[in-house]
């Protein structure tokens, strides 16, 4: 939804369409809506200003008459550059040229809409991969923050690899899942996503080839593509990544690294089997193909713990291991960790200092206290119980409403149900119609262009009532499309 900091006054002497025209003119004059930029649709403006579309139409017609806007069929209404002298002594820079020149690719329109709509309280979020605010451990967080006031003597910058206290606690925690890593081999990052940025900047080069599962969370990002790298998707089955295909493709294409989510894969929920993990390591070791293991969902098992991480089986320093508290505790802490050979960690720590001079000191202290106090493990036990209930409610709602519409997996953990719609349907049309009904979806084709009959449903964020009612309403939308 469009966010504006102003509404027209219906009691003012100046007609509302003139007030809106003046507001838009000011946006153009101060450069917020730059020359060449496409302005929001009449429908979006009418919703934002809480007026009829006819009022918006009158305002835009006035601005077109003044030569400030231009409308073309198929391309919308844009700010034009033929009457800047009315507003400014000298024309401002054409910011659209700068925007298009940036090396970092923009999100797809659907992902941009998802990112906006997630903050609309009127929307039921059936795709959000985040722990619900209902499950936030308020009392435990109060205990942690209370202890910090006694521990912290200052909040200055931390050393390049991150707060030593936190790295020591993470080192101890990693031992519980079979990973031996000294604090010197651990880098604190602002979430696992930053680790991927650092790897793309510090270890890779343009035209490098990245192998990954298909579908994959990484397809919804432009971390590697924006740096000029190529991505090649590998098939995925119920035991995980197809290792035989990887071996074949690596011989032909010579990839630079492999990115994988072996435990509770995003978006499919698949857990890579123990045998498949061993086969994968063997293939990568023989071809000297480094692995990025994204293990942020590991602790969210609901039926039984997943097999040991690839990093726990790694005897040659092949695996760069990503962990995080974003999925299990709080995304707002922005705390994750990267584990790898010390030279790699030194290189990426130096690069991190060049980009943000270290993650938040307060967040690092809080994360360390969560681990040191034992509260993190206590919280994980509770969150698994809550997620198991949510998964059950979701599966029951699917059985009631989707038995003749779709098929789905029963995830053993994590957040996601990978739902396959039985009949062909336009993902864009489904996304728009569902959003108009107050339901926000994550279409499968943002994780793989060919997954255009899939939805990534999440049971982690919406309330139990929202899950039941949202899925019932989604089934109605689907039937209307069919």
Image (cartoon, grey):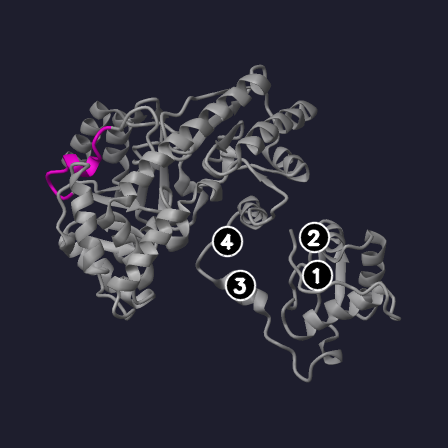
Determine the CA span between mark 2 and mark 1: 8 Å
Looking at the rendering, which quadrant does residue 349 occupy? bottom left
For residue 211, say whether it is visible.
no
Question: What residue is pinned by disc 2?
Answer: 75
Proximity of marks 1 and 3: CB atoms separated by less than 8 Å? no
Query: What distance separates the C-alpha of mark 1 from that of mark 4?
Result: 19 Å
CB atoms of marks 2 and 1 within 8 Å: yes
Q: Which mark is residue 411?
A: none
Image point 32% across, 43% down: which residue? Answer: 210
Residue plotted at (73% across, 67% down): 24
Nearest to N terminus: mark 4 or mark 3: 3
- Which comes before the other along the chain, label 1 or label 3? 1
Q: Which residues are magenta?
A: 307-317
Residue 106 disc label: 4
Q: Secondary structure at mark 3?
A: helix
| Alpha carbon distance from label 1 to label 3 | 15 Å
Whole-percent x and y of residue 421? 55, 23
| Dominant SS in magenta | loop
Q: Earlier in the sequence, mark 1 or mark 4?
A: 1
Q: Nearer the viewer, residue 270 or 174?
A: 174
Judge whether 75 appears above or below 286 on screen. below
**Horizontal arrangement in the rendering, residue 25 relative to residue 236 (left or right):** right
Pointer 4 with pointer 3, Cβ within 8 A? no
| CA–CA distance in space, label 4 to label 2 | 19 Å
Task: Name the mark on residue 99.
Answer: 3
Q: Mark 2 near mark 3, Cβ–Cβ under 8 Å?
A: no
Q: Nearer the viewer, residue 402 or 325?
A: 325
């Amino acid at each position: 939804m469009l966010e504006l900091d102003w509404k027209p006054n219906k009691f003012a002497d100046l007609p509302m369409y003139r007030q809106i025209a003046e507001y838009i003119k000011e946006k153009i004059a101060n450069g917020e809506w730059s020359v060449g930029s496409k302005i929001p649709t009449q429908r979006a403006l009418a919703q934002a200003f809480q007026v009829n579309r006819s009022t918006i139409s009158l305002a835009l017609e006035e601005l077109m008459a003044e030569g400030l806007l231009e409308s073309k069929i198929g391309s919308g209404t844009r700010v034009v550059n033929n009457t800047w002298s009315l507003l400014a002594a000298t024309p401002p820079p054409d910011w659209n040229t700068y925007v298009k020149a940036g090396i970092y690719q923009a999100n797809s329109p659907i992902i941009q809409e998802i990112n906006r709509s997630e903050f609309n309280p009127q929307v039921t979020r059936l795709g959000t991969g985040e722990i619900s605010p209902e499950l936030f451990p308020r009392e435990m967080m109060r205990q942690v923050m209370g202890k910090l006031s006694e521990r912290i003597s200052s909040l200055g910058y931390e050393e390049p690899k991150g707060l030593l206290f936190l790295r020591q606690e993470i080192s101890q925690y990693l031992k519980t899942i079979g990973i031996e890593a000294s604090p010197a081999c651990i880098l604190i990052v602002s979430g696992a996503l930053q680790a991927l940025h650092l790897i793309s900047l510090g270890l890779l080069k343009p035209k490098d080839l990245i192998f990954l599962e298909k579908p994959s969370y990484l397809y919804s990002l432009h971390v590697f593509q924006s740096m000029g790298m190529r991505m090649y998707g590998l098939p995925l089955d119920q035991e995980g990544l197809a290792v035989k295909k990887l071996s074949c493709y690596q011989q032909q294409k010579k990839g630079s690294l492999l990115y994988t989510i072996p435990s509770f894969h995003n978006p499919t929920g698949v857990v890579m089997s123990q045998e498949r993990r061993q086969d994968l390591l063997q293939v990568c070791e023989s071809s000297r193909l480094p692995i990025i293991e994204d293990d942020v969902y590991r602790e969210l098992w609901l039926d039984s713990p997943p097999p040991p991480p690839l990093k726990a089986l790694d005897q040659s320093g092949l695996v760069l291991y990503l962990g995080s508290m974003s999925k299990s505790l709080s995304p707002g802490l922005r705390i994750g960790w990267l584990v790898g050979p010390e030279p790699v960690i030194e290189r990426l720590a130096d690069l991190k200092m060049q980009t943000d001079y270290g993650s938040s000191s307060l967040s690092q202290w809080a994360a360390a206290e969560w681990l040191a106090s034992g509260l993190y493990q206590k919280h994980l036990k509770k969150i698994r119980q809550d997620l198991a209930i949510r998964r059950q409610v979701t599966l029951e709602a699917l059985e009631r409403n989707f038995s003749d519409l779709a098929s789905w997996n029963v995830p053993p953990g994590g957040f996601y149900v990978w739902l396959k719609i039985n009949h062909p349907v336009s993902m864009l049309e489904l996304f728009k119609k569902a959003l108009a009904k107050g339901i926000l979806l994550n279409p499968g084709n943002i994780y793989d262009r060919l997954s255009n009959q899939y939805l990534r449903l999440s049971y982690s964020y919406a309330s139990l009532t929202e899950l039941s009612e949202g899925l019932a309403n989604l089934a109605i939308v689907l039937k209307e499309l069919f």
